[in-house]
Amino acid sequence: MKPAARGFTLVEVVVAIGILALMLIAGLGLLAVSARSGGDGFDADATVRLGENVQGELERLKHGADLAGLAAIIPPSGAATPLRLVATRDGRRVLRCDGAAPAADRALDDPAQPGIAVRDRYYLLEVEQQLDLPYVPDAGFLAVSVRVTWPYQVPTGPAVPDATAADASPAREVPENERRATVFHFALRP
């Protein structure tokens, strides 16, 4: 006598597929969280690199003037309008974006110092003098605070091919309450 062949019932197959689908959905959810936290780690790493590049931009602004000249363009903490800089997402390019003829708005193909496209202005950096260490000409240093928020601008469409103007590619400013932020401090010497 042969044993009866046993197969899966339709109900068992549907339940197994349902369980597999739930496992896949949970796995994809974990993957999305992992990807987001990996991106946050990249942003935090780039934020750390910004310090050196912010100092480089401030040194460039100081070029041709002394520390007192730089102190004159960096307002004290709590001022209505801090000195504003922008940086690319990798944190390697930092340029001033306020005042007359801001460096960030220069032509993108400027051979001496190209600007930064609005869509690539990922970090907004607001620089102020520290109130607890005000600039004194004889002190030999200028203490500054830099508030970094990101993402500052995000692309809203494809990049304009061969764009030469900083605002040629579509972008939108992210509201401040939707940005992440950090603050760092350093001293500039003559």
Image: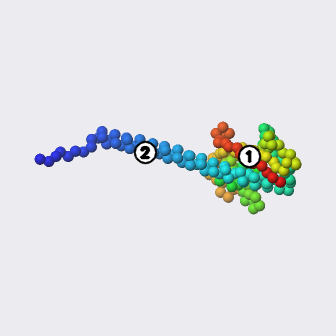
Amino acid carrying label 1: it is: His
Mark toward the viewer: 2 or 1: 1
Res. 109 image quadrant: bottom right
| Disc 2 to disc 1: CB gap under 8 Å | no
SS for callout 1: strand
Residue lying at 80% horizontally and 43% vertically, measured from the top left? 133
Distance from Cα at disc 2 to Cα at disc 1: 46 Å
Left or right: 11 in relation to 43:
left
Residue reaching furthest to the front: 139
Residue 25 x %, y %: 44, 43
Residue ID for mark 1: 185
| Dot 2 or dot 1, earlier in sequence | 2
Residue 147 visible to an observer of this rendering: yes
Q: Check disc 2 and report the residue beneath it.
A: 24
Amino acid carrying mark 2 in the image = Leu
| Residue 167 visible in the snapshot | no
Give the residue at x 83% y 54%: 190
Near mark 2 (Cα within 10 A), the count class, few <14, some 14-19 or many ≥20, is: few
- Name which quarter of the figure residue 80 lies in: top right
The location of residue 160, given as percent across then percent down, is 66, 54
x 71%, y 46%: residue:
184
